[in-house]
Image: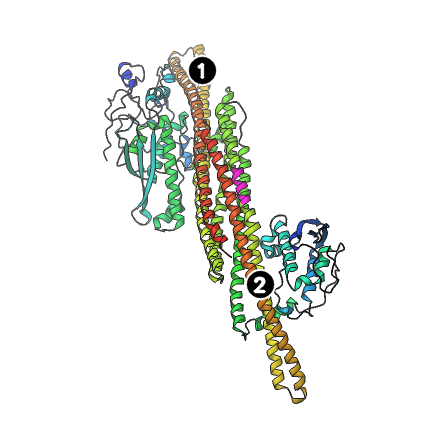
Amino acid sequence: MADTARDPPPDHTDFHELEDGEDLFPEPTSTLESGPASLPAEDISTNSNGPKQDSLFDDDTEDLFAEATEEVSLDSPERDVLLSDGPSPAITPITPPISVLTPRIGLAHDDMFTHSSFDEIEEEEGGDSFDMHISVSDPEKVGDGMNAYMAYKVSVKTSMSLFQSHEFSVKRRFSDFLGLHSKLASKYLHVGYIVPPAPEKSIVGMTKVKVGKEDQSSNEFVEKRRSALERYLMRTVKHPILLKDPDVLQFLESSELPRAVSTQALSSAGLLRMVNKAADAVNKMTIKMNESDAWFEEKQQHFENLDVQLRKLHASVESLVCHRKELSVNTAQFAKSAAMLGNSEDHTALSRALSQLAEVEEKIDQLHQDQANADFYLFSELLGDYVRLIIAVKGVFDHRIKTWQKWQDSQMLLQKKREAEAKLQFNNKPDKLQQAKDEIRELEGKVEQGEREFEQISKTIRKEVSRFEKERVKDFKAIIIKYLESLAQTQQQLIKYWDAFLPEAKAIS
Amino acid sequence: MMEEVKEVTSTLSVDIQSIKVTEVVKEGDTLTFLIVSEKLSGTGVYHVDRTYDDFEWLQQHLYSQEDVSGIQGVIFPPLPVKAQVNASAKVIKQLGILGLGEWQPYCKAMEAFLRQIATHSILGKNKAVEIFLTSSDPPGRQRARKNIFNRLSQAMEGMRKEGHKDVDEFFQTERDHNIVITGYAKTAAERFLDVVQTEQKIAVACGHFSTALRLCVEQGEDPDKLDFSKVCVKLSEVFDSIQKNMTSVTENNVSTLGLGLDLESRYQEAEKEMLFRRTCKLVELEITRRNAEKAKPVKKAAMEEVKKAAETEFDHISGVAKDEIARLQAARVKMLQQALVQWCEKQLLTAKESADQFNQHLRAFRGMA
């Protein structure tokens, strides 16, 4: 189960910076999960597996993710159960993972957080432009009965220096993917990164496969899942931050992966429920967010609209797929009728032509099936993916509101403490006064932290949204081109069939 | 100039190939068909309007030609089921492919019916045909007298007589074969209709998708938004093309092979009816023979007369039937060939046009930076 020890990526100049400077993350106790196990303990590596600024100040382990699969209230303490199940065991962490970080007190922040963010990583790694192709293939049933599972081969082809070799593959099962998503979500979602959602679980689909039903519907299910897993991974690695996450790298490269224990990962339904609950909670709070930034208001509306439109488009395409499949069935039926007619026909040439007609119709049936698959795998799944992605986007916006709320709460508390302090001063209670002053200093720190977090998440979201919009256009274009190619090919095939049939039809006389 | 022949039977004064049902007009609940035909004299064109009842009038007149020897051996061109405004589900099912669209396939079928009658060597001579095509007044609407083609009585007797063994091997074979082909032809026509109707659903779904895409166009000058809007607009154009292609494919299907299969199916039924009439006559004949045999001397001569008459009639019918069968065979092979060739040519053209369009779209998308 040993993980391959990894050396830090060569271009990482930040690393050296860290060793010199001591002002970046001076607090030794809470650090980010370090990537390579070989890093010295006292410094935080910059190839961190999470957003830097967040790790140290997240005293609030309150997290909404528990909502995803359990009806846990927003303030419940048993929150982390569904997040990353502890540290990624294969990489022995030097320090505890982010999700259970102890709060840091009285840290002097500095501007390193605003610019020592992932902007730098992206720019420094800029020399290595994105060149990676992942395929998920060869689904293989492992085991028997209800304990059986499907193992998929995950193959990577890349020229990027981030990886140890240019072509490699590993075997993964569905819960591994869910585990990966769970880890990424717990690290990145609440600081504003749009983490691509994992493919949906399906009890019915999987049970059929386990039970060993080798029929068309279970084959279709496996293929649908395989395709979804491939798209999921590609989307994840296209994200410049997520690509460098050690969990992602481990997932892709490590020959053995510890089993994800709690794979009740964020299903989209769960995520949506969580988002809705968070939205409700935010609304119920007495102070509503004063959106000073029109950009966010506009974008929020934009994503609401997009959600509605995408769902409509998705429904439309589903209906199209359904009809195409029906057409395939009907064409096959007609082909059979034509064959029967041909067989009973006395007139030789007509009989032959009718039999040829039956053959042509059978071939056309196959074309309809191929087209239905194109409709489905290209458009229907693309739209479905984006509907789920929008849910993640909405979640990120809600986290921003929550972050703002936290900041406001700290401010209010500070205000109260100041008033209390003034009273104490007036009443001249020196011992209590000192305590009050300490508390105030602590709260001032919190307020500053809150403001910084809010600014950071706002900044991150702006970048993420911009990235999302660009990717969206690229994604759609790529799919549309593939679809058009399939359409053009179908017509070419039809032309061939008709060209071949015409002389047969003319020969009847 | 050709003079119009004033006989009980007449020669048609119109060019048969010019007979067209040009349109159908809805007047309340009634459908009125406008029929145009060119005068053989070259002096112009007849325009008449006829309802379905008028077509039935024509048909009844043709049925009731009892003076024509062997008339029961004729395979009568099949008249489509009555088209109705707001037709019931049952009627729509009976109409099959003829019930599609705004009655264009139906008009084509009615037109074919008229041409088939006009070109028939026996039927075309009936003056009812001339009246139907040329008279500006609607032909008499009285119901023709009850005739041998009363379908109801036929249906009742059908069970017993249909299977009655034939005396002529040719006809026995033909009857057996006809039953098989009638079944297959009907099924083929029905399944083809299923294909066509599903294609129509797909065309509609494409239209919806295209519309939904245009609604995704976003306002604003944000370059990413503009890019996405452009993608949506172009994709909606793609689906417009797909819709157009599907609509074309469907039209081609209906207007060629669809009509062909429908006609084949109805003609096989018509032949079945003719063969059945002959079989009924055969049964009658055998009865008269038995009666003649068993007749008491007093009645014997009369019975023999009856028997002879029945034999003669039966021979005539069989003679006409043989000709009709041969005629039908030749006609249907030609018709199906035409249908298949036209179908194939049209689909080939549509496929080429669509391939061009899709390639155009593909180039446009690839060109989009």
Residue at the right extreme? B137
* Residue in view at x 50 percent, y 56 percent: A508
Tell me where the magenta segment starts and ends, as one range. Answer: B239-248
Kindly identify which chain the residue marked by label 2 belongs to. B
Measured along the vertical axis of the image, is residue A377 above or below residue B151? above
Location of residue B303 in the rendering, given as x and y in whole percent from the top left corner: 65, 83
Secondary structure under the numbered disc 1 in the rendered image? helix
Q: Nearer the viewer, mark 2 or mark 1?
A: 2
Hey, what amino acid is under mark 1?
Ala
Secondary structure under the numbered disc 2 in the rendered image? helix
Kindly identify which chain the residue marked by label 1 belongs to. A
Mark 1 is surrounded, within 10 Å at the Cα level, by few (under 14), some (14 to 19) or many (20 or more) other residues, namely: some
Q: Quadrant of the C terminus of chain B?
A: top left
Identify the image quadrant of residue B139. Answer: bottom right
* Residue in view at x 39 percent, y 32 percent: A235
Query: How many numbered marks, from 0 up?
Result: 2
Hey, what amino acid is under mark 2?
Arg
Q: Quadrant of the N terminus of chain B?
A: bottom right
In the rendered structure, find residue A232 and report the number of the disc placed on it: none
Please name the residue that numbered disc 2 is placed on.
B327
Please name the residue that numbered disc 1 is placed on.
A420
